[in-house]
Image: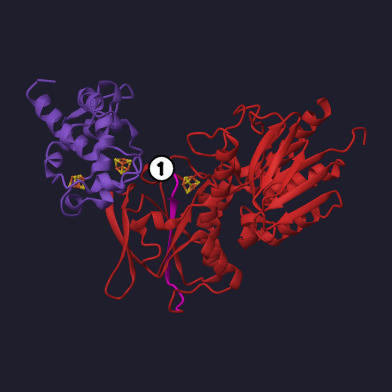
Amino acid sequence: MSVASKHVVVAGGGVAGMEAAGALAELGHRVTLIEKEQKPGGHLKQWHALFPDRRPADEVRKYLSRRIDNRNIRLFTGVGVDKIRKEGHELCIELSDGSELTADAAIIATGFDLFDAHRKEEYGYGIYDNVITSAELEDMFNTGKITTADGRTPSRIGLIHCVGSRDEKVNNNHCSKVCCVTAVKQAIEVRQKLPGCEVFCFYMDMRMYGPYYEELYRESQEQHNVNYIRGKVSEASVNIDNRLVIKVEDTLAGRPLRMELDMLVLMVGMEMSKAGTRLAEASGLDRGINRFLETGDHHYGNNISHLKGLFYAGTCTAPMNITDTISHARAAVAEAVRYLNTR
Amino acid sequence: MSGSTRNKFGFTVNRSRLIDYDSSDRLVREYITSREPSFRLCFACGGCTAACTAGHHAPFNLRRMNTLIRRGEIDPLRDEVTRCMLCGKCLLVCPRGVNTRNVVLLAAEAIRKLDRNEL
Ligand code: SF4
Ligand code: SF4
Ligand code: SF4
C-alpha cells in the first residue's frame, strides 16, 4: 500500500455499507462500520430468494459477511449516526449513544425504508387479515407456509404493483424500480409452491429494466401461467364470506373488473429512510424532490455530497437493486480513495 | 364519421376504425388543457374508472375518455360525457393528481361548444 492508511466511517450496514466497508478495508484503510440494528445486513436479512435468477438470498448474505470479515473493520451495532460535520480536514461523526468519532472520510449508506402500507388505506392493510406486503410474502417463503390468516391454502392471490410509488396521493412520484420484477419473481414462486393457486399481477407499466428481467416476465407467462391485468386497483373490501374483493379497470379491455381473492400482496416501494432523513437534516445535506439524498451530479458525480470527504452509497440516493447497490458502493469507495490520495 | 376512405394501396378502410391523427380535432383537447393543465398528467391507469359508480352501470369510462380526447376522437364521447354524476370519487383515487371532475365538466362544455361552432 503506497498510501498511509486512513480512517473512514461508513454509516449504515446494509448491502451498500458492507460492500463499501469491505472494499475500503481491502485497500488497507481502517473502517468503522456503524449499523443501527443489532445485526448488519439491512433489508436483505428478510429476503428468501432474489430476482432475476431466484438464487437464495443467503448466498449474497454470506458474500457480504465474508466481505466485512477483515481486521481493518470495526463493526458497531445497535448505534446510529446522528450527525456528520466538518472540522478542518476531518469529519466528526456524532453517534446516537453520545460518542463522537473523527474520520478522514465518510460514506453514508443509510439505505431505504419500505413504504408503510397502512398509508394506502383503500387497500385495507392492517384492516383485512389477508392483505399483506411483499416483504411479508417473503417471510412466508422463508417459513415455507403460504396460508391465509385462518390457515387455509389460498386458491387465488393478487399482487398489486406500485403501492406507495408513482402515487401523488402518498407524496411519492418516483418509481421504486425493483417492485415490478419482485412481483414477477414472487408470482412464479407462488405458482411453484402452490400449483393450484391462480396468480394475478395488477400493474400500470411493467418495468423490466435489468438484465434477464424481461426473460423472467416471459417465463412467468410461458411456464407458470401468471396472469397480468393492466390497471390500478382502486380499492379492496371483503364480502360476506370474508373473501377479499378488488375493484380495478382492465384498461386493455376497457372495462371495470371486480375479482374475489384469498390474499392480496402489496408491492411496497422504497422511500428515503427515516434514519437517513434525520441524519441529512441534522447535517444540512441536500435532498432531491423524491427526498433521497441529492448527489453532486446525476451523471458523473452520483456518489458525491457537497461536503468534501463525504460520499454516498446505495439506496440513500435512489431506489436500486442489489447489483447496482454493490456497484454504487464500489464507486463511492473509488471516489473516497481518490479524495484521500489527493488530500 | 361514417363511410370509408380509399388509401393509396387500393383497398378501403373503414374510417371510424382509424385514428387519423393528422386530421383529428385538437380543439377539445386544447380547451381542456388550457383550463385544467393537470389533464396532461393522466397516465391511463384506470384508477378513476375502477372507482366510478356511473361507469359500472353505463358505458362511461373516464380513462378512455381522456385518451380519446387526446387523440382528437370526440364523436364516441357525446353521449358518455353527460353520464358523470360529479361525485368526485375519481379525484380521491387518481395517482397523478388529475383534477378529474373538472376535466369531465370541461369536456362536456367543450363538446357543447364544438357542436355550436363556438370553439
Ligand atoms: S418498479 Fe414497477 S411496481 Fe415498482 S414503482 Fe416502478 S412501475 Fe411500480
Ligand atoms: S365524478 Fe364522475 S367520473 Fe368521477 S367517479 Fe364520480 S361519476 Fe365517475
Ligand atoms: S386515475 Fe388519473 S391517471 Fe389514472 S386514468 Fe384516471 S385520470 Fe388518468
Pointer 1 residue? A171
In the displayed structure image, the side of residue A68 where residue A243 appears, left or right? left
Q: Is residue A40 magenta?
A: no
Residue A251 % position (x, y): 32, 47
In the displayed structure image, the side of residue A257 where residue A37 appears, left or right? right
**Residue type at mark 1?**
Asn
Residue A267 % position (x, y): 47, 55
Image colour assigned to chain B: purple
Q: Residue furthest left?
A: B116
In the displayed structure image, the side of residue B43 where residue A92 appears, left or right? right
Q: Please tell me which residue is depicted at 61% across the width and 54% down the height of the picture.
A: A51
Q: Is residue A158 magenta?
A: yes
Q: Quadrant of ligand 3?
A: top left
Image colour assigned to chain A: red
Q: Which sits in the foreground, A21 or A84?
A: A84
- The magenta span reads A152-166
**Total numbered badges shown on the rendered structure:** 1
